[in-house]
Amino acid sequence: MLKSKTILLGVSGGIAVYKAVELLRLLTKAGATVHVVMTRSACEFVTPLTFQTLSGHPVHTELFNLYQEQEIGHISLADRADLFILAPATANLIGKIAQGLADDLLTTTVMATKAPVLIVPAMNTNMYENPLYQRNEKALREVGYHLLDPVDGELACGWTGQGKMPDPQDIIAAAEDILTSKDLTGCRILVSAGPTREEIDPVRYLTNYSSGRMGFAIAAAARRRGAKVTLVAGPVQLTPPAEVEILAVVSAQQMHDVILDCFDAADVVIKAAAVADYRPQIRQQQKVKKMADDMILELEKTPDILAELGRRKKRQILVGFAAETEKLLEHATQKLISKNLDMIVANDVSAPGAGFDVDTNIVRFLYPDGRVEDLELMSKTEVADQLLDRVRLAWQKHE
Ligand code: PMT
């Protein structure tokens, strides 16, 4: 998402400047080219050398510095940016921008840019609540600047309240959001993720290795692209993506009931969950005691949710996943046809870097007309975007 993007990072003077260093590191790690502009007071907290070393580019501090202007002038900086992030943004900086002032390099560059601007305020909580500050913030939002809310917590000045700069990861997520085209606006997508748990007794259950990462990546990417997303998740240890409706379930039966309830309202269903195929026939009320050397656990089939959706579907686009350890194409094709899907994502979960509980995946997209698309090893977020590119085309055809 941030790969090959040019980001201008404007840093103004507050204790949170140290967090801007981590933000810069994450931006460059994500493949962005970052140019840093610092105010004089920001240089009092962290030296420009730190930002220069991490960005690999000279840091810009002075409006009237002939050497810096010759290297790359402030108008050129403003022009080449895909996104301008101001982090941390002090009350003073925000006040100046809101008044249209341009009296140093940073404010002049903000004034000159046509790129979207993401402002990340950080300040004392009383300053943040001050009506004059709030008026400035409102004025900036009204003319199209993007602002992140500061978070609650203990502030460096000793106060506790709202005013802390959000975590760099959250700033990156907001930046990605701004840079993403909203090509799924109006599309309602139902995603399933994670494993299910089938209880044997009050202390034991049957499950699998699904972490939920694949489904969560799809939900987050779809939301970023403007879709209205409902995520039905089995038991996972992940932070839910922002602005996604989360419906938590435990067993295959619960996942079945919740998904069927949501089905009519969905335009697209993507089933990345690893649903148990079998559950114990009887769930024991008390802990099963160790007695004989052998024990037989009688299992019964769980409802096949996707197959049922395939039978019921009218206008919905139905995407399944196939987790296989052998005969990938053969087994995935059989599921694609028998469950009446529009597409299936086949992953060989025995391949290194693919499948359960890793950040990457290697997948093949299979279609009912026999087409197969092979994707290389990539992050689950990239797989999600590739998948949603195909889903968007199918959804637009349906519209
Ligand atoms: O969660 P991660 O750690 O990120 O791992 C990702 C993943 C490996 C779980 C994911 O990429 C994946 O392959 N998900 C599907 C796993 C699976 O259960 O595959 P399956 O071949 O058993 O099922 C085929 C399809 O039918 C799946 O879409 C499944 O959700 C669905 N199904 C299966 C059984 C059942 N009772 N009801 C279903 O709806």
Image (spheres, helix red, strand yellow):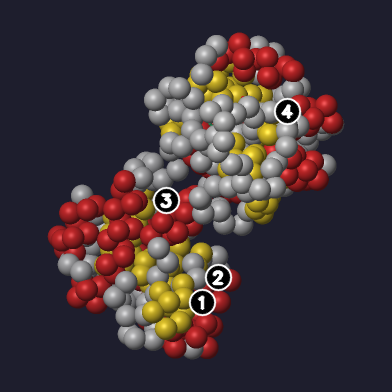
Picture coordinates of residue 235, whole percent (x, y): 58, 47
Q: In this view, does 109 lie above or below 156?
A: above
**Along the viewing direction, whichever of 25 and 254 lies nearer the viewer:** 254
Mark 4 and mark 2: span between their CA atoms?
54 Å
> Pointer 2: residues within 10 angstroms few (<14), some, or many (20+)?
few
The residue pinned by badge 2 equals 141
Type of amino acid under label 1? Glu
- Circle 1: is it few (<14), some (14-19), or many (20+) Cα within 10 Å? many
Q: Does the residue labelled 4 lie within 8 Å of ligand 1?
A: yes
In this picture, residue 326 sits left or right of residue 92:
right
Nearest to N terminus: mark 4 or mark 2? 2
Disc 2 and disc 3: Cα gap in Å?
19 Å
Residue for point 64% across, 44% down = 201
Q: Position of residue 239 (x, y in %)?
A: 51, 54
| Circle 2: residue type | Arg
* Residue position for label 4: 301
What secondary structure is found at the residue carrying circle 3?
Answer: loop
State which quarter of the image contains the N terminus.
top left
Which is nearer the eye, 42 or 351? 351
Mark 4 or 1: the one toward you: 4
Q: Mark 3 points at which residue?
A: 82
Tell me, yes or no, whether the two marked residues, 2 and 3, touch with CB atoms within 8 Å.
no
Dot 1 and dot 2 residues touching (CB under 8 Å): yes
Q: Tell me: residue 292, above or below residue 103.
A: above
Which sits earlier in the primary sequence, circle 2 or circle 3? 3
